[in-house]
């Protein structure tokens, strides 16, 4: 008999399994995929660690979490500085003095602020009613038209005028010449890829891949005293209050033989409406790779329907209300712990998943 059956070998399930084992508990980890790591999985191809589920950059302000992940592997000094490509014009992200200088030729922060203010005034929006109005009221029309509109409309599959304003409550605008995307104190990429971290977490723990919890539910549940469930919460309750909606993505990965350096940066966003993908990732640049070949991945947003890979929860009122009903049921399942992005219907960065797994561990074992 196992103490815990852990459904999902992603970051949440793996942190929990590691901490439970440390406390002498016996765990069985299952995953329906053919690999561990969930969405942070990296696979070595041609000597390059390929981020199979999109670009993953670790960043946090929390020293305890930074020390925790560094206990599994060393991190490099990678700093995320994405570039936006709008019809061949290149701009630095996040919006900063480099962006404003390229866009308007302004040199000082005061000139940039004045330009944005002027565009906001001309637009005359007092109470933004949709994403377009919200974006214009925050950064003016030029940035909205070139760097936000096309990208956001591709990402969400609908017009910015039909999207709610709350999606962009704030926009990262910086009046310094600083291209570092994140404000966090700690940032980097694990040397050797993210899969190494998960391998270390799951060392000495029984893991079964290609096992879907719902295909053998009763049998699996009977193997353990408790279940840690990191799959979709609506599926756990047989969709009784309806389906929670997501946005999906698909990735097209290509090995490029005839150049060692395809785009000169790990992440380039394509912000026009016409290019069908939202970004191209060149994986070797996450680790300053010097391999003979290079590997790129185009990221295409797509509509989600049940059965597709769920990526981004659509946290609008309707879905949040439905989630609340599932959450209430989950709270009445004493032998099941629900955790991670799918079971809590929430977008989490990696440091947040680790933080929430560690809080769960403390509640389970130390209180
Ligand atoms: P998951 O990794 O999804 O793990 C859940 C696991 O459960 C999966 O392996 C799944 O196969 C398994 N499972 C589900 N249902 C079943 C079932 N019925 N039976 C068996 N197994 C099941 N975070 C950052 O900090 N920085 C970034 O730059 C970043 N970039 C991202 C880019 C993209 C495109 C996306 C989508 C996410 C990004 N994230 C990033 C977030 C990061 O991926 C998540 O924080 C993290 O992967 C969540 O871990 P998890 O364990 O909650 O979920």
Image (cartoon, rainbow, N blue to C red):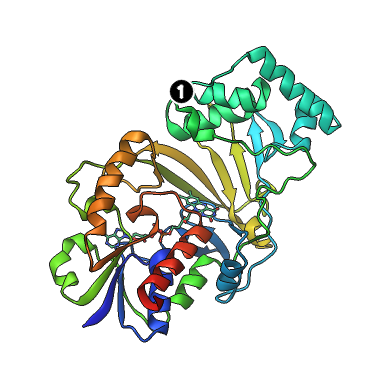
The residue tagged 1 is 159
Identify the residue at the far bottom of this view: 24
Q: Tally the numbered discs.
A: 1
State the image quarter where residue 230 is shown: bottom left
Residue in front for this viewpoint, 272 or 138: 138
State the image quarter where residue 79 is shown: bottom right
Residue in front for this viewpoint, 360 or 132: 360
Q: Is residue 248 among the parts visible in the rendering?
A: yes
Q: Residues within 10 Å of mark 1 (few under 14, many from 20)?
A: some
User: Quadrant where the C terminus lies?
Assistant: bottom left
Spot occupied by residue 330 in the image (x, y as percentages of width and height): 25, 57
Q: Is residue 3 rendered to the left or right of residue 301?
A: left
In the image, residue 103 sits, relative to residue 197, either above or below, namely: above
Identify the residue at the far front of this view: 367
Identify the residue at the far right of this view: 107
Residue drawn at 53 percent across, 37 percent down: 278
In the image, residue 229 sits, relative to residue 349, either above or below, namely: below
Spot occupied by residue 13 in the image (x, y as percentages of width and height): 38, 67
User: Quadrant where the N terminus lies?
Assistant: bottom left
Residue drawn at 60 percent across, 72 percent down: 67
Residue drawn at 35 percent across, 53 percent down: 344
Spot occupied by residue 360 in the image (x, y as percentages of width and height): 40, 67
Residue drawn at 57 percent across, 44 percent down: 280
Instruction: Report helix, strand or loop for mark 1.
Output: loop
Question: Ligand 1 falls in which quarter?
Answer: bottom left
Asked if the residue at label 1 sits under 8 Å from ligand 1, the reply is no
State the image quarter where residue 185 is shown: bottom right
Q: Is residue 276 among the parts visible in the rendering?
A: no
In the image, residue 329 sits, relative to residue 268, either above or below, namely: below
Spot occupied by residue 90 in the image (x, y as percentages of width and height): 70, 34
Q: Is residue 208 rendered to the left or right of residue 301?
A: left
Q: Is residue 109 rendered to the left or right of residue 196?
A: right
């Amino acid at each position: 008999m196992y103490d815990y059956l852990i459904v999902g070998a992603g970051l949440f399930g793996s942190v929990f399994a590691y901490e439970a084992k440390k406390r002498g508990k016996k765990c069985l980890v299952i995953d329906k995929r053919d690999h561990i790591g969930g969405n942070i999985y990296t696979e070595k191809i041609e000597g390059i660690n390929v981020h199979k589920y999109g670009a993953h950059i670790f960043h946090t302000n929390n020293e305890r979490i930074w020390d925790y992940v560094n206990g599994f592997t060393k991190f490099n000094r990678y700093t995320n500085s994405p570039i936006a490509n709008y019809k061949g014009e290149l701009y630095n992200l996040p919006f900063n003095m480099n962006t404003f200088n390229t866009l308007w030729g302004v040199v000082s922060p005061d000139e940039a602020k004045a330009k944005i203010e002027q565009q906001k005034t001309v637009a005359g929006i007092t109470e933004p009613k949709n994403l377009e109005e919200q974006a214009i009221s925050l950064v003016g029309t030029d940035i909205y038209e070139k760097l936000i509109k096309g990208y956001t409309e591709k990402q969400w599959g609908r017009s910015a005028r039909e999207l709610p304003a709350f999606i962009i409550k704030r926009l990262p605008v910086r009046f310094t010449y600083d291209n570092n995307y994140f404000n966090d104190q700690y940032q980097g990429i694990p040397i050797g890829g993210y899969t190494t971290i998960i391998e270390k977490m799951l060392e000495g723990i029984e893991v079964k891949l290609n096992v879907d919890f719902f295909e053998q539910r009763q049998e699996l549940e009977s193997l353990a005293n408790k279940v840690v469930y990191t799959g979709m919460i609506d599926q756990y309750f047989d969709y009784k209050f309806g389906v929670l909606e997501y946005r999906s993505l698909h990735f097209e990965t290509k090995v490029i033989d005839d150049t060692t350096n395809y785009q000169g940066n790990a992440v380039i966003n394509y912000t026009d409406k016409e290019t069908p993908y939202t970004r191209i990732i060149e994986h070797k640049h996450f680790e300053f790779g010097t391999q003979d070949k290079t590997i790129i991945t185009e990221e295409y947003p797509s509509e989600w329907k049940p059965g597709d890979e769920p990526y981004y929860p659509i946290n609008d009122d309707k879905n949040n209300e439905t989630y609340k009903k599932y959450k209430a049921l989950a709270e009445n399942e004493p032998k099941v712990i629900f955790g991670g992005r799918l079971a809590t219907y929430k977008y989490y960065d990696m440091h947040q998943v680790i933080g929430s797994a560690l809080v769960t561990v403390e509640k389970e074992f130390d209180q």
